[in-house]
Image (cartoon, grey):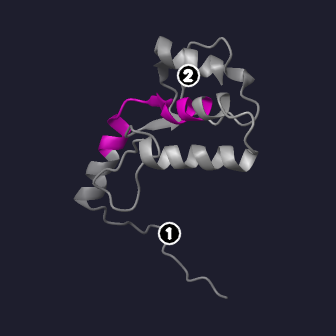
Amino acid sequence: MMMPEHEPNMTFEVSERVMREREQLFSAPPNVDTDKLKIEVEVYEGSEAKSPAMRRAEVLNRLCHEKPIFIDGNPIVGNLTKYKYGGYFIPHSHFTWTRGLKEFALQRGATIQMTEEDLNCIEKA
């Protein structure tokens, strides 16, 4: 299959909507969402007798019914956190690196201060 040749100095028009979404994303403060982590801790703490599949199913059910997500004006993308620019923890493996930390950072490097409630949840996980 031959790839079409492109002009080296090709420019693209960016719509006003895309520029607005880009500006909003890059100006949004970073946040870490612990809602998913809290649900996982609650389910796994009280369900030792259940099979791993049933525990995961209960987590998924609660995430679908309880977890807020961020959906902006862009019909194609959103965020699995409740924030415009946010991240979340995945505690299934190698989560010990979080022990004792009081702040975290996302890709753009801004430091995120965590609340005591969130830090307690991270310690439980």
User: Which residue was labeled with disc 2?
Assistant: 104
Q: Nearer the viewer, mark 2 or mark 1?
A: 2
Query: Looking at the image, which residue is at 40% across and 51% down?
Result: 78
The image shows residue 60, relative to residue 12, as above or below, that is: above
Q: Residue at x 26, y 49 (%)?
A: 20
Residue 106 appears in the rendering: no
Badge number at residue 8: 1
Magenta stretch prevailing secondary structure: helix
Helix, strand or loop for disc 2: strand
Q: Nearer the viewer, residue 11 or 80?
A: 80
How far apart in space, not on screen, are marks 2 and 1 (Cα)? 40 Å
Q: Quadrant of the C terminus?
A: top right
In the image, residue 32 lies in the stretch drawn in magenta: yes
Q: Which residues are magenta?
A: 23-41
Dot 2 crowding, Cα within 10 Å, few <14, some 14–19, many 20+: some
Q: Of all residues shown, which one is farthest toward the left?
A: 16
* Residue nearer the viewer, 67 or 17: 67
Dot 1: element: loop
